[in-house]
Image: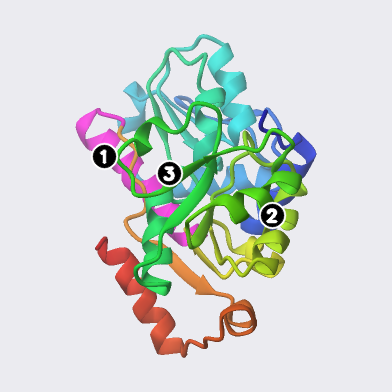
Amino acid sequence: MPGRMTRRSLRRLMAAGLGVLTVCFIVWPARADLALYGGDEQTREHLHALLTTELTPVQWRHRDLVVTVGAEALADFCKSGSSTPVIATYLYGNQLPLASENCTSTVAVIPVDPPANVLHRLARALFPDSTTAMLVADGGEADMVDSPILQLPVPKDGVARGLGRLISDGHWDVFLMPVDPRVYRGTDYRLALETLFRHRKPAVVSIPSLLSQGAVAAAYYTPAMLNAALRETFRHWVQSGKLVAKRPPDVQVKVNQTVLRNGFGRVLADQEERALEAEVNSGE
């Protein structure tokens, strides 16, 4: 069975990768018709300032919206049974199914990490003609049915112990490691990256904090990108009345030059790294 990351370790990982503080369930009515659930005061003030400049007080009279900060806040709000539309922020994409399972309202999610196909594009750009693989929770991923990414079952004896065997038995080149609390325990990220490096298998990740633990490259959203996506989602809702999540259109790419050089005998100049980022964002 896949391990579950504890709440403490998940908060620690999010804080390292995104600068997000401990999530708590707090209602803070920024205006009469806007409520923010979860997060610390600084985050709520930031979101309040980001969104309330989009509408005049007159426009707010007939607007109802909730913004949740973190997966726990979304789950707690959904349990309330409210039908108010929700923009869910500061959560990983793989946390959504569990966090939103009790929702009766429309939920637009802006995850802090890009989807697996973006990691696949980065892997292929950095290692041309490579094949990719990733661990998936029981049953696989429904949106990856036609994906070129090889879906590997989580080892029954856990990621830390079983990954070496999957590497030896597999026929793939690059390992993709999105943050997924359904698959990885808190220490599994570091142990998996150490195992991959020993076997000379490059790992591409979705948050930059994992680069220091041995990943070769990361494709991720910056805070500025996420802020822009939130404002675009909000603006579309104001103008059309339809709540549709707007992901950031691009990602930022960062390469761990030490791992690339020591593990794979390569060095990228700054302009080559930027060209790599442009290739990933081209969608090709």
Name the residue tied to disc 3.
Answer: 51
User: Upstream in the sequence, badge 1 or badge 3?
Assistant: 3
- Residue 120: image location, x then y, percent: 40, 57
Q: Nearer the viewer, residue 242 or 42?
A: 242
Dots 1, 2 in contact, CB < 8 A: no
- Residue 269: image location, x then y, percent: 46, 90
Q: Amino acid at mark 3?
A: Leu
Q: Which mark is residue 180?
A: none
Toward the left, the furthest residue is 240
For image coordinates 72% across by 39% down, the residue present is 158
Location of the C terminus (image quadrant): bottom left
Q: Is residue 155 above or below residue 21?
A: above
For image coordinates 44% across by 56% down, the residue present is 132
**Residue depth check, mark 1 versus mark 3: number of the one nearer the observer:** 1
Q: Is residue 101 left or right of residue 57?
A: right
Q: Nearer the viewer, residue 107 or 28?
A: 107
Confirm whether the magenta stretch covers residue 3: no
Name the residue tied to disc 2.
Answer: 192
